[in-house]
Image: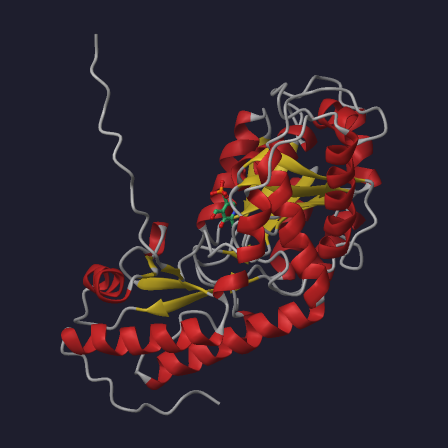
Amino acid sequence: MRSPPDTSEFDTPSRILMGPGPSMIAPRVLRAMSTQALGYMDPAFLEIMDDIQELLRYTFQTDNEWTLATSGTGTAAMETAIGNLIEPGDTMLVPTNGYFGDRMGKIARRAGGDVVTVDAPWGEPLQPADVAAAFDEHQPDVFGFIHAETSTGVRQPNVSEMTDIAHDHDALVLADCVTSLSGVELRLDEWGIDAAYGSPQKCLSCTPGATPLTMNDRAREKVLNRETDTGSWYLDLDLVMEYWGDERNYHHTAPTTNFYGLREALRLVAEEGLENRWERHREVAGELREGLQRLGLDPAAEKEYWLPSLNTIEVPDGVDDTAVIEFLMQEYDIEIASGLGDLEGDVWRIGCMGYSARRQNVACLLTAMEDALEAQNFDVGETPIEA
Ligand SMILES: Cc1ncc(COP(=O)(O)O)c(C=O)c1O
């Protein structure tokens, strides 16, 4: 007989989360998530799902009927989108300019797709001319891109130009909006994006677990007319939509409290107003970017395609990036993160998302960063900032 493990209470430390996600949970979301469970067919719960769909349509700026929350994290939504849109033998075009474009390719390959790439250096966005050349060369069925690349802090501009190219070649466009949804300008229908997913735990300031996903009619037709079943039964959208749509057939038990939280997070977006929220992220992250520049640090992403929700900052020569991260955590209870993939050791990643995107957090982070750099003997004299 095993003896019971230690059951003493774990005192969760109180942190300021300024990393690449999760962001801090909005207090109203926390309260909503502590509400008692409802059955998955309870009319009150179905009403909550209806609310989520309508609020998501607003947040994505889309009229898509197929708009829902996937049960799982961002990667589950990525698997759902790719696994349903890609059939064995289809070709998917993915970018090489960041960690998550690469993940799209890995998932497409597992779905039986042929994966081809459009190249751009890490830290730069895709160029429409390169996308056009890749289309001419490979004739892909689906083009996937990352609207907000969390590994590089790059926001992809020229989205409409890229979707026009894809549609001229009769292809579908899938956008990863994990780090942009509700924090950065995103207009799904106007920009011609056929399918997209976001994240609850970034700019929405909810917990991971129920992830926004949407597809327009063109994408839905492709899913409904597949010659082969989707590889995953759990993530098969045709079946999942039987629960989210009018049929209300049981497919799997919904993550109850995640739905409560997501609904509340989306209500907060609607109350603030999308454009105000985009502007708040730009303003607060702008103060962060300028404050760090004043300390003598350089942003890694050009202002032109800077991503307010995720700021990559170059680690200066002679400074130990990990020591700074540990200092911030130990002395100030602030979380930031190191670089990911190709940029490991070269940059810090500082998030400015949702409930974390507040001036008081920026002020605290700048003070903490100044201390951390001084502890490394880095000269933090006043540095003029870029125009
Ligand atoms: C751009 C992007 N796509 C996908 C994911 C995967 O999301 P998750 O870690 O919630 O599965 C992340 C996670 O940070 C991300 O930043």
Residue drawn where x is 80% and y is 59% of the image: 190
Q: Is residue 103 above or below residue 343?
A: above
Locate residue 211, reporting x and y percent.
60, 41
Residue drawn where x is 73% and y is 40% of the image: 48
Q: Is residue 379 above or below residue 317?
A: below
| Image quarter hosting the N terminus | top left
Q: Is residue 227 left or right of residue 266?
A: right
Residue found farthest to the top: 1
For the residue pair 152 and 55, the one nearer the viewer reads as 55
For the residue pair 94 and 254, the one nearer the viewer reads as 254
For the residue pair 91 and 227, the one nearer the viewer reads as 227
Q: Is residue 175 left or right of residue 3?
A: right
Q: Is residue 98 above or below residue 385?
A: above
For the residue pair 343 and 356, the one nearer the viewer reads as 356
Q: How many marks?
A: 0
Q: How are the colours assigned in the image?
A: secondary structure
- For residue 83, what is the image quadrant? top right
Locate residue 256, reporting x and y percent.
61, 33
Residue drawn where x is 70% and y is 37% of the image: 141
Locate residue 167, reporting x and y percent.
78, 48
Asked whether residue 97 appears in the rendered view, the answer is: yes
Asked whether residue 199 appears in the rendered view, the answer is: no
Locate residue 264, reporting x and y percent.
65, 51
Q: Is residue 111 above or below residue 148?
A: above
Residue drawn where x is 63% and y is 24% of the image: 253
